């Protein structure tokens, strides 16, 4: 998992720098929301169509069979892959100047969400129920922060539960 964390840190730095550069071509609030929501919609649909159905039944933290717990590793990894692509596209957007600081915080929280999903995948591979539980708690907390920031700014798709 050290390699994943390094890639995440480098990507987050690049994405946050790209989001901060902006310049004179930053879109209006409405244009920015439309661009970001279109990206979020694309990846929400991709997740629903390509990944969601691959999750096994049950709660991986309470399953008794290690093999049943390990069955969550690939769906967690696929979830990470889908939303990492979303993260990269969102990071390439230049927000309006009045939202730059909040957008950096949103991307940082999204990065934490991705790290938690990667942690969950690794824990599932090891049938580590406690590790999965910890990852799920971290994912919920960081996703909640993404939602809060997105809703406050007026996003309709990004950050919605």
Image (cartoon, rainbow, N blue to C red):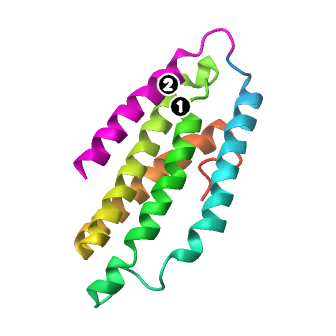
Left or right: 85 with respect to 155? Answer: left
Q: Is residue 65 above or below residue 128?
A: below
Q: Residue furthest bottom?
A: 64
- Tag of residue 69: none
Number of dots carrying numbers: 2
Q: Is residue 32 above or below residue 54?
A: above
What secondary structure is marked by label 1?
A: helix
- For the question of whether residue 148 can be seen, the reply is no
Left or right: 126 with respect to 146? Answer: left
The residue positioned 48% from the left and 85% from the top of the image is 57
Q: Position of residue 132 (x, y in %)?
A: 31, 69
Q: Position of residue 136 (x, y in %)?
A: 37, 64
Q: Is residue 26 above or below residue 32?
A: above
The residue positioned 71% from the left and 47% from the top of the image is 156
What secondary structure is marked by label 2?
A: helix
Magenta-highlighted residues: 1-25
Q: Position of residue 141 (x, y in %)?
A: 40, 54
* Residue 5 is a magenta residue: yes
* Residue 22 is a magenta residue: yes
The residue positioned 39% from the left and 58% from the top of the image is 117
Q: Do labels 1 and 2 touch, CB within 8 Å?
A: yes
- For the question of whether residue 95 can be seen, the reply is yes
Q: Nearer the viewer, residue 23 or 122?
A: 122
Secondary structure mostly seen in the magenta stretch? helix
Instruction: Identify the residue position indicated by label 1 in the image.
Output: 103
Between the residue at mark 1 and the residue at mark 2, the CA separation in whole angstroms equals 5 Å
Q: Position of residue 129 (x, y in %)?
A: 26, 76
- Dividing the image into 4 quarters, which one contains the C terminus? bottom right
- Tag of residue 101: 2
């Amino acid at each position: 998992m050290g390699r994943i964390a390094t890639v995440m840190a480098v990507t987050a730095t690049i994405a946050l720098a790209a989001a901060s550069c902006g310049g004179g071509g930053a879109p209006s609030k409405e244009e920015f929301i439309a661009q970001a929501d279109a990206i979020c919609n694309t990846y929400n649909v991709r997740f629903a169509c390509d990944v969601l159905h691959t999750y096994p039944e049950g709660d991986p933290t309470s399953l008794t069979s290690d093999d049943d717990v390990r069955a969550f590793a690939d769906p967690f990894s696929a979830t990470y892959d889908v939303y990492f692509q979303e993260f990269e596209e969102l990071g390439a957007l230049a927000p309006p100047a009045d939202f730059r600081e909040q957008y950096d915080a949103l991307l940082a929280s999204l990065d934490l969400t991705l790290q938690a999903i990667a942690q969950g995948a690794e824990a599932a591979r090891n049938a580590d129920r406690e590790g999965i539980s910890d990852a799920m708690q971290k994912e919920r907390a960081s996703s909640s922060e993404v939602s809060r920031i997105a809703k406050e700014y007026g996003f309709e798709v990004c950050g919605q539960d």
